[in-house]
Image (cartoon, helix red, strand yellow):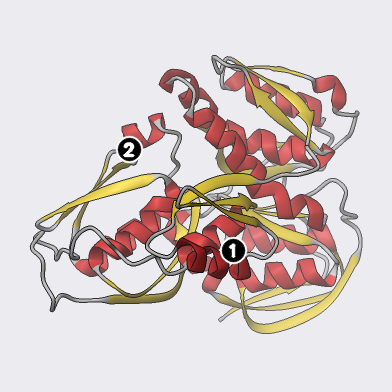
């Protein structure tokens, strides 16, 4: 059990004054977020409390510029998982918290509710670009700044480091930010985190060479289609009840869902429609009525670590075509959620991979992962 006692400690120096923190990601971050901690804050400013906790646990946070960093916390928890501590802090201050890759972002509820959807919409645009252009926008880079940095400069620097032109910076008002140090993020995510604090997102040029800042639209949603199976109406009704804030429609036997990324993840994690074309296959590819079945009520994590964990438990050799995934704009760090009930091995991996835009081939004990398109 880790004890985090915060009364009035000095914050760790911002980027540049000390060696960068070895922020956690992937399975290491997942384990850390499940680790119980004891927290005692007495009259501690919000930023001081949350950032100190983040540094001590190596689980990165970013606080939106619109949040008062000096508001006092008088909170105590014993044995609460770190992820829940973050969420409870946000709730007590009428804030939201959203994870963008390995970063917990604290901000106004409206901003946190659309953050991941905005980032995913931009990634979908990147996937339609030529591969070389897409790589620039998806290449990871560490982001950090000292006290009194200006967001205009941060955006300009991030774009320049990726070889991308950026316009519309005049829409970002002059502001001075407290220092921060964050783990590596794609340019898409870096710009989303910074520009989103001014209710801005960005448009990508047709050749991927430039981005232009634009206001966030009133309605932020992702549209995706799903096979309807044998009974599309019944499936659509079930999904409509599962994600009541999203629009669910049937068109030519397919189910179209329009809503935030989190709703699509809930749908992807729900039970799949019955298979119609062929019997389930066992690990060697042969039909079998007695093969092992899998039930996962609520699985979640980042795509890459989840695959590694499943492959390890099932005794499979995992081969990921990382170059192809990168060309397709698919990140192994993207968060996923899924659930299966009495599923075959094939159905299990479909539930994990299909929402992320991936497919697989299972031959003997080798599991190969590649883009679906």
Q: Is residue 236 left or right of residue 357?
A: right
Task: State the residue in front, 53 or 310.
Answer: 310
Q: Nearer the viewer, mark 2 or mark 1?
A: 2
Residue 76: percent from left, percent from top: 77, 81
Q: Quadrant of residue 294?
A: bottom left
Q: Residue, x 90% and y 67% (percent of image)?
A: 72
Q: Is residue 171 left or right of residue 32?
A: right
Near-viewer residue (159 or 285): 285
Q: Position of residue 124 (x, y in %)?
A: 54, 35
Specify the farthest residue to the bottom.
78
Question: Tag 1, which secondary structure?
Answer: helix
Work out whether 109 lies above or below 205: below
Q: Is 348 or 255 nearer to us in this picture?
A: 255
Q: Position of residue 264 (x, y in %)?
A: 55, 56
Provide the residue designation for mark 1: 57
The kind of secondary structure element at disc 2 is: helix
Image mark for residue 322: 2
């Amino acid at each position: 059990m880790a004890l985090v006692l915060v009364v009035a400690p000095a914050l760790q120096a911002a980027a540049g004054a000390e060696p960068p923190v070895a922020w956690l990601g992937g399975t290491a971050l997942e384990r850390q977020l499940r680790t119980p901690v004891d927290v005692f804050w007495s009259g501690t400013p919000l930023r001081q409390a949350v950032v100190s906790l983040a540094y001590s646990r190596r689980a990165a946070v970013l606080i939106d510029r619109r949040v008062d960093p000096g508001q006092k916390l008088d909170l105590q928890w014993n044995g609460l998982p770190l992820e829940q501590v973050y969420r409870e802090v946000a709730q007590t201050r009428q804030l939201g918290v959203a994870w963008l890759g390995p970063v917990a972002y604290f901000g106004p509820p409206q901003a946190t509710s659309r953050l991941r959807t905005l980032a995913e919409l931009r990634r979908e645009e990147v996937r339609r670009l030529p591969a070389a252009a897409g790589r620039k926008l998806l290449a990871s880079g560490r982001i950090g700044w000292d006290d009194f940095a200006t967001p205009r400069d941060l955006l300009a620097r991030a774009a320049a480091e990726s070889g991308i032109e950026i316009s519309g910076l005049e829409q970002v008002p002059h502001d001075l930010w407290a220092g921060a140090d964050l783990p590596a993020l794609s340019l898409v995510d870096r710009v989303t985190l910074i520009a989103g604090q001014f209710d801005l997102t960005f448009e990508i040029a047709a050749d991927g060479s430039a981005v232009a800042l634009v206001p966030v639209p009133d309605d932020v949603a992702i549209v995706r289609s799903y096979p309807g199976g044998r009974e599309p109406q019944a499936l659509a009704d079930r999904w409509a009840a599962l994600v009541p804030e999203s629009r669910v429609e049937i068109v030519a036997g397919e189910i179209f869902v329009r809503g935030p990324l989190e709703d699509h993840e809930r749908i992807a994690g729900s039970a799949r429609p019955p298979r119609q074309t062929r019997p389930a296959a066992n690990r060697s590819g042969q039909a079998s009525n007695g093969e092992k079945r899998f039930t996962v009520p609520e699985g979640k994590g980042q795509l890459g670590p989840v695959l590694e964990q499943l492959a390890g438990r099932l005794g499979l050799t995992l081969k990921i075509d990382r170059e192809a995934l990168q060309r397709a704009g698919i990140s192994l760090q993207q968060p996923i959620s899924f659930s299966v009930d009495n599923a075959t091995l094939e159905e299990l991996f479909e539930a994990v991979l299909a929402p992320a835009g991936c497919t697989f081939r299972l031959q003997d004990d080798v599991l190969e992962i590649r883009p679906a398109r």
